[in-house]
Image (cartoon, rainbow, N blue to C red):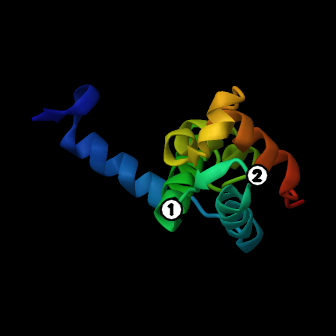
Amino acid sequence: GTVRGGLSRAELTQARQAIGKVTAKPEVLSYVGQIVRMTREMDKVLMGASSRAAVHLLQASKVRALLSERNFVSPDDVKRVCRPVLRHRLTLQPDAYVEGFTTDDVLTTVLERVEVPR
């Protein structure tokens, strides 16, 4: 039968296999790790992203690469999916919310600070 979004099980399996073939260079893996680590080091953050969040960030980046018809993850793929993947995985300090900061603001700062691999 069909599952979520009207995909058949065979199509879902194919999609999973295709994602599994998308590669990420060590420097891109390091980039993902640095982004997630920095979310835990920011002043305004009470609870940053977990190592599990890093896995999800990489998976989403692979999907983005695949949708862009590439079999490798670029730093741009990581940047593009960073906010949607991580925004709900951060908890800000109470005063940060009072000051009007959002998790997206924090993630924007993180993306500006972490050096992009060339």
Q: Residue 49: x percent and y percent?
A: 56, 56
Q: Nearer the viewer, mark 2 or mark 1?
A: 1
Disc 1 target residue: 55
Q: Amino acid at mark 1?
A: Val
Q: Quadrant of residue 66?
A: top right
Residue sitting at 29 percent across and 50 percent down? Answer: 13
Q: Indicate whether 26 appears above or below 86.
A: below
**Gap in Å between the C-alphas at discs 2 and 1?**
15 Å
Q: Quadrant of residue 6?
A: top left
Q: Amino acid at mark 2?
A: Pro
Cβ–Cβ below 8 Å for labels 2 and 1? no
Helix, strand or loop for disc 1: helix
Q: Earlier in the sequence, mark 2 or mark 1?
A: 1
Is 54 left or right of 11, judged from the image as shown?
right
Q: Quadrant of the C terminus?
A: bottom right
Q: Quadrant of residue 116?
A: bottom right
Helix, strand or loop for disc 2: helix
- In front: 61, or 70? 61
Q: Residue 26: x percent and y percent?
A: 72, 73
Residue sitting at 39 percent across and 57 percent down? Answer: 17
| Res. 30 in view | yes
Crowd rating for badge 1 (residues with CA inside 10 Å; few <14, some 14–19, many 20+):
some
Q: Residue 63: x percent and y percent?
A: 52, 45
Is 18 left or right of 61, judged from the image as shown?
left
Residue sitting at 63 percent across and 32 percent down? Answer: 97
Crowd rating for badge 2 (residues with CA inside 10 Å; few <14, some 14–19, many 20+):
some
